[in-house]
Image (spheres, grey):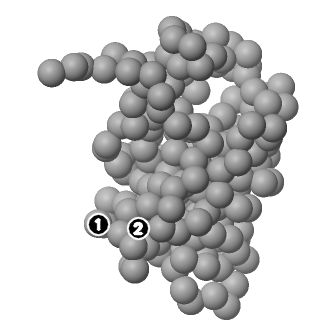
Amino acid sequence: MQQYLDNTKYINFHDKGVADLSKNLRGSHIDDEDIAKRCFEWVRDNIRHSYDYSMNPVTCKASDVLRYGTGYCYAKSHLLVAILRACNIPAGLCYQRLSLKGDGAPFCLHGLVALYLKKHGWYRVDPRGNKIGIDAQFKVPIEQLAFTTLLKEEADLPEIWPDPHPLVVKVLETYSTYDAVYENLPDIELVYL
């Protein structure tokens, strides 16, 4: 479980801004569910999704997401994981493979967070931000994510990553504008048995 509590290059909760935010969100709460819900809702509602708001710069490190107030789903997830870890709640990154327009190719990865709650075990949340047609919520033990996988080429990938997937990092560190990221969203081919 230690790897889901570590400070890393991208999940950098030792950054003063991230540490201070975590402390404020935790407040006097001691229940991990209450703390996790507060952290999730803060990132979901206060950090703007880069594409939804046509916002630059492209962010990857948790501290940069907080500093600039924007990020793609992946980067918003990096910040949420950092805040949760600073509150001593194990957390990691997970991904869905989704159709970009909902009707087939092209496909891309979508970033989510898995967090570990003492009463429920691993639980996924989606901090990408709500808008018309998207209503991600924290309703333990029911998952209410932004997207569901409906097509056979879509999938909920089972891994929980302690650090961002290298393909995600490559895209976020290669392209400097939100629209360039959108044109080059990372994807993984599914292997069918």
Could you say which quadrant of the image residue 2 lies in?
A: bottom left
- Residue in the foreground of this view, choosing between 3 and 39: 39
Q: Residues within 10 Å of mark 1 (few under 14, many from 20)?
A: few
Q: Which element type, helix, strand or loop, lies under badge 2? A: strand
- Residue furthest to the left in view is 193
Task: From the top left corner, tell me how far across and down residue 188 is, in percent.
Answer: 38, 20
The N terminus sits in image quarter:
bottom left
Q: Is residue 193 left or right of residue 31?
A: left
**What type is the residue that disc 1 sits on?**
Met
Q: Residues within 10 Å of mark 2 (few under 14, many from 20)?
A: many
Asked if residue 132 shows in the view, the reply is yes
Q: Which residue appears at 24% of the width and 19% of the height? A: 191
Task: From the top left corner, tell me how far across and down residue 167 is, in percent.
Answer: 43, 24
Could you say which quadrant of the image residue 175 lies in?
A: top right
- Residue in the foreground of this view, choosing between 16 and 192: 192
**What type is the residue that disc 2 sits on?**
Tyr
Q: Nearer the viewer, mark 2 or mark 1?
A: 2
**Marks 2 and 1 in Cβ contact (< 8 Å):** yes
Q: Which residue appears at 47% of the width and 32% of the height? A: 149
Q: Which mark is residue 1?
A: 1
Q: Is residue 143 left or right of residue 183?
A: left
The C terminus sits in image quarter:
top left
Asked if residue 175 shows in the view, the reply is no
Q: Which mark is residue 66?
A: none
Task: From the top left corner, tell me how far across and down residue 56 is, in percent.
Answer: 79, 28
Q: In the rendered view, tell whether residue 69 sits above or below residue 56.
A: below
Q: Is residue 23 left or right of residue 153?
A: right
Q: In the rendered view, tell whether residue 50 sits above or below residue 146.
A: above
Q: Which residue appears at 52% of the width and 68% of the height? A: 140
Check disc 2 and report the residue beneath it: 116
- Residue in the foreground of this view, choosing between 176 and 141: 141
